[in-house]
Amino acid sequence: MYYCKRYIQVLIVLFCALLICSTVQAKPKYLFKMATIAPEGSIWTNRFYDFVAEVAERTNGEVGFKVYSGGIMGDDRAMFRKMQIGQLHGGGFTMTGIGTVVPDFSVMGIPFLFHSYEEVDHVKEGLWPSFSQAFAEKGLELIAMTEVGFVYSMSTSPISTLNELKKSKVWAPEDDPISIAYLQTLGITPLPLTIPDVLTSLQTGMVETVFNSLYGAIVLQWFTKTKYISDIPFGYAYGALLLDRKKFSSLPASYQSVIRDTAKKHFDLLITDTRKSNDDSRQVLRDNGVSMIIPDSGDVQALSDMRDETVRQVQGTAFSPQVYRTTVKLLEDYRKQPPE
């Protein structure tokens, strides 16, 4: 009798274990395959996994995300092509990469446009409706905007003047007509490369000056070659979390709301994470032998003045006149506000 009861207990335990395993391993009813060039273990992928976990919890496991990080699905253009054929259903895109699809989205990347993150946040909020509409017209659902942060000029030798910059081999993102035009306005012929190609090009000497946020330079390992940073922000870099609009629209309305609400929560936190990581990275870089170079003040003004000439050249191709006017108006309105 004892052994019979014991046998039944064992069977019950095994049944429960199998039930739990089958529940855990069950495939989501709605699965989104996502890709990003962000490295595994970075704040961007870590925060995304937090978002994924909460969405799964709030939808009882019916909505899931399979993530391909670190650029294994290719750069932004390759990711978008794979979305078009249904191999992917979304991704984390850089402003330059997805700017080839929705040019207006890159308007906030104009060099020397912003003076503070407060200005960034105000303009971003004001542009969100037009960005969302522009992506929708391309079959994309804008779920969140991500951030790289203010980017700096980083080089293999110290650069403090414009003339020194002109003598350097300068990189520009391959799909970034704004940065390319700006550098050409300065009298520099940049070498366009995709982000995954930059580290190798630094190692071989193909390029000597690049642009990145302080944290980005660490996670992408660029700081191992760029031991000098010009200590003035060159511009602002950001990105977008996008989903295939048709697949997103096929979700129940309640699940669409879950994704939006959860994305706002976690990607707002990501902005905080990113800004703190950039602040902390300054000391990390110094501890690893990177020197912060103070640029010549006269040249800084000249660099800023070249912004308007660049805008005149690229407006209408890199971004529309309408979105630029809106951006400038939002920025001017913010700067007119009395300080708190």
Image: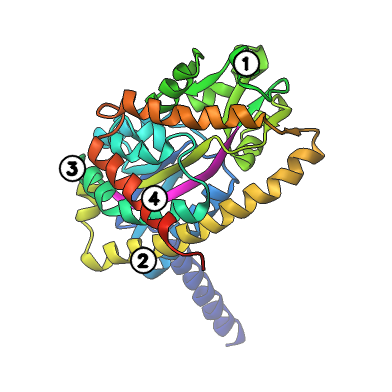
Q: Secondary structure at mark 1?
A: helix
Viewer-proximal residue among 131 and 84: 131
Q: Which residues are magenta?
A: 141-152
Q: Is residue 212 left or right of residue 225?
A: left
- CB atoms of marks 4 and 1 within 8 Å: no
Residue 145 on the magenta segment: yes
Q: Position of residue 319 (x, y in %)?
A: 29, 33
Q: Residue at the spot x=23%, y=43% of the render?
A: 134
Which marked residue is nearer to the observer: mark 3 or mark 1? Answer: 1
Label whose residue precedes the other's in the sequence (4 or 3): 3
User: Vertical placement of 314 versus 169: above or below?
Assistant: below
What amino acid is at disc 4?
Answer: Leu
Q: CA distance from mark 4 to mark 2?
A: 27 Å
- Residue at numbered disc 1: 163
Camera-side mark, 4 or 2: 4
| Lower sequence index among marks 1 and 2 | 1
Q: Earlier in the sequence, mark 4 or mark 2?
A: 2
Closer to the chain start, of discs 3 and 1, is: 3
Secondary structure, magenta segment, majority class: strand
**Within 10 angstroms of label 4, few (less than 14), some, or many (20 or more) residues?**
some
Report the residue marked by disc 2. Answer: 261
Asked if the magenta segment contains residue 125, the reply would be no
**Looking at the picture, which amino acid does disc 2 mark?**
Asp
Question: Which residue position is annotated with label 3?
Answer: 137
Which residue is labeled 4 in the image? Answer: 331
